[in-house]
Image (cartoon, grey):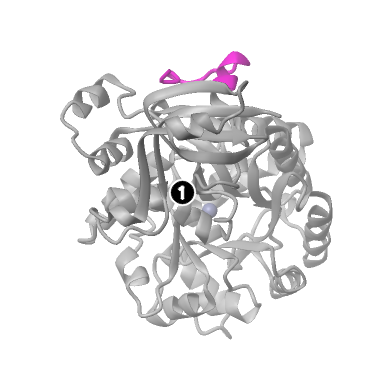
Amino acid sequence: MNAILLRGRLLSFVDRPAAIDDARSYRYESDGGLLMVDGRIAASGPYASVKASSPADVEEVDHRPHLILPGFIDPHVHFPQMQVIASYAGSLLEWLNTYTFVEEQRFADQDHAGRIASAFFDELIRHGTTTAAAYCSVHKASADAFFAESMRRGTCMIAGKVMMDRNAPDALRDTAESAYDETRALIAEWHGKGRNHVAITPRFAITSSREEMEAAGALAREFPHLHVQTHLSENAAEIAFTRELYPEAADYTDVYARFGLLGPKSLLGHCIHLSDREADALAESGSVAVFCPTSNLFLGSGLFDHARLSGRPTPVRIAIATDVGGGTSYSMLRTLDEGYKVLQLQGQRLNPLESFYRITLGNARALGLEGSIGTLNTGTDGDVIVLDASATPAMRLRMETVATLAEELFLLQTMGDDRAVSEVYVAGNAAKSVLATNGINNGSGTGR
Ligand SMILES: [Zn+2]
């Protein structure tokens, strides 16, 4: 039996906070204990009582005065874009054609895919992200490398081979048939292995023919428990081109609806320029709009209208993600900070309790995985992180004047990055400090 007892300030959400003073939306334990046994959370609550119920030989780690939260969840990220991030481009289609479609060709090489997959998991863990929904490249080998790395790390991951058969370089094009066959092979080889989930991943309407969209729809019908991930309504030129390619559809959202690709398992990146009809179609189908603030700002795509989507009679389900490498940071804290500013520009505000709800339980609910990740509930997987709101001299100085939990969280999201993530546990095992002991460059400090 592998048992570990963490001591610190526990914070976990039970529902979406209605306001900054909504104390019923979360559980907070100022001297908390979190017991993990064989990769799962076995108990959490006041330290003294959890300690009393722990095995005599339990390993104890004292993280006081830091916060202990569920691991962060990033529901939209591109692992083959680690060497695309920070590319100087004007807008989405130029960025894709000039940088991304060139770089992704390298993932035909299994060694390259393996090397980047390893670096990608290091980076996620360094930033406190324990689950992601990732796009691989068009090559099945890239998804094989990703899932193999996830097995080694013991992580809960969602990923898919990108389906794309047009409007891209020859070397990045599959066919409707090969996309279907290779996705099926991935499902057989990886879905349910370890904590891996395979997602049906048509890149977006522009890069898939009708035949390939039909193949994606067929997969979604055959495997209704699988996630579908794609992009929707990011940029004006993209929307115009999509309308040209699919004149029979009422709008961009209707393209996906026609092929059976909307639904509660569908993760739609961006959703910036939606009409009311489109927003209602997402709401009624239970599809998830994924807000990617650093990417939307970097590519000048537009401002995600959180209030309009969440304030409808039937609200659109919302998640928040990095979208690296259109996004500019692996950090969900940096993502919250930029998301806050995107809403500020529209006269909207996201309070810090809701922010931290979003990147934990909120994103877990968006993925339909709240039964296993996103909380500190007994019986769920032991993916937890330790946050230090005094990680840098400037943060330490500001912390001197912080009086409430909400203020501390807001400081973390406004000033924090990987340095504020003091430790990460994946399935009950320390994962961030291990990066350092393995001799991997651990950035500017672990905070411990
Ligand atoms: Zn994306």
In the picture of the structure, the residue carrying the numbered disc 1 is 360
Residue at x-position 20% and y-position 61%: 347
Query: In this image, 436 relative to 359: left or right?
Result: right
* Residue 65 percent across, percent down from the top left: 34, 25
Q: Is residue 190 visible?
A: yes
Question: Which of 114/133 is in front?
Answer: 133
Question: Is-magenta flag for residue 407?
Answer: no
In the rendered view, tell whether residue 238 sits above or below residue 254. Answer: above
Main secondary structure of the magenta stretch: loop
> How many neighbours does mark 1 have within 10 angstroms: few (below 14), some (14-19), or many (20 or more)?
many
Q: How many marks?
A: 1
Q: Is residue 90 visible?
A: no
Quarter occupied by residue 245: bottom right
Quarter occupied by residue 83: top right
Question: Which of 153/175 is in front?
Answer: 153
Helix, strand or loop status at disc 1: helix
Which stretch is magenta? Answer: 433-448
* Residue 287 percent across, percent down from the top left: 53, 70
Residue at x-position 74% and y-position 44%: 194
Quarter occupied by residue 14: bottom left
In the rendered view, tell whether residue 307 sits above or below residue 248. Answer: above
In the rendered view, tell whether residue 229 sits above or below residue 103. Answer: below
The three-letter code of the residue at mark 1 reads: Thr
